[in-house]
Image (tube, rainbow, N blue to C red):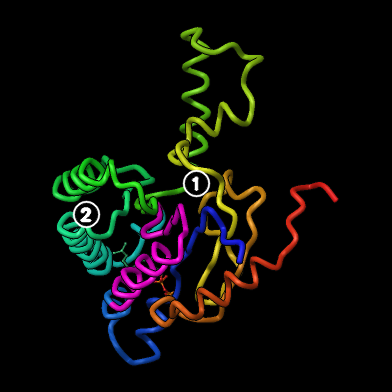
Amino acid sequence: MCLPEHLGIIMDGNGRWAKRKRLPRKVGHTAGANNFRRIVKHCSKIGIKYLTVFAFSTENWKRPKEEVVHLMELFKQYLEEALKDFQDENIKIAFLGERKVLSDDLQNLIEETERVSANCDGMVLNIAMNYGSRNEIVEAAISLIEDVLEKKINICDIDAEALSQRLYTKFCPDPDLIVRTGGEFRISNFLLWQSAYAEYAVVDILWPDLKPDNLDAILLEFSKRKRRFGGI
Ligand code: FPP
């Protein structure tokens, strides 16, 4: 089966999962975090090279404070575990997003996780946290303008590759497939530039319920698609 080299996942549906069970939304996020662990392990096992997950968007700060605090706590817990287990897992972890506004604790953990896992040569796990694709593109455009003003780049040498090299994802290929759980047909400011030729799969399964078998079925369906990249 032809796997996507780079798989993106929008992990949507934690809140609805909890609501259906008449539980607080927090419980849905905890279940979502547990499923994230399971799916990360599965992707690594089956040979996905790059996995990018949307963990927290620049718009998610609008949620009730209690929910945001809980999500930040779940991220911390995961990073603390990752720091302990990184050698067994051999997963290289990178963060996409604006980290300066995160708590000092979380920023330190992020730096430590990236440092400690830097030499892992298994799957690359990109965690998009406080990530918004429009901001990312604006920042890349500003960086290009600065480089032109400082004569580091000639204006006629600006092309798509020059902009790509100024995105958080500069070290990885564009995503081949973006999966969204929870059944909604939206991109939600995720990898807008990078997904120009990505395939999409929307599944009507809430994130905490997405099993490795469900993902395998999505990957099988993807492997049968004929990608044309604008050609014939
Ligand atoms: C969307 O579901 C999910 C999020 C905003 C957070 C994603 C976080 C996790 C899966 C858990 C933690 C992850 C890590 C990296 C440890 P929603 O709340 O919008 O669900 P709804 O659409 O049903 O309300």
In front: label 1 or label 2: 2
Packing grade of label 2 (10 A; few <14, some 14-19, many >=20) is some
- Residue 46: in sight, yes or no? yes
What quarter of the picture does the N terminus occupy? bottom right
Q: Tell whether position 48 is magenta.
A: yes
Q: Do the residues labelled 1 and 2 touch (CB within 8 Å)?
A: no
Q: Read off the magenta span.
A: 31-58
Packing grade of label 1 (10 A; few <14, some 14-19, many >=20) is many
- Residue 128: in sight, yes or no? no
Tell me which amino acid carries mark 2. Answer: Gln
At horizontal 54% and vertical 53% (from top left) the residue drawn is 5
Which dot marks residue 46? none
At horizontal 55% and vertical 30% (from top left) the residue drawn is 163
Please tell me in which quadrant of the rendered image residue 199 appears.
bottom right
Label 1, label 2: how far apart the Cα atoms are: 31 Å
Query: Cβ(mark 1) to ligand 1 < 8 Å?
Result: no
* Residue at far top of view: 151
Mark sitting earlier along the chain (1/2): 2
Instruction: Give the percent coordinates (x, y) of residue 49.
Output: 46, 53
Instruction: Give the percent coordinates (x, y) of residue 74.
Output: 23, 65
Q: In this view, does 99 lie to the left or right of 19?
A: left
Q: In this view, does 4 lie above or below 16?
A: above
Nearer to me, 99 or 179: 179
Tell me which amino acid carries mark 1. Answer: Ser
Q: Mark 1 points at which residue?
A: 133
Q: Name the residue under label 2.
A: 87
Quadrant of the picture in which ligand 1 is shown: bottom left
Label 1: state its secondary structure: helix
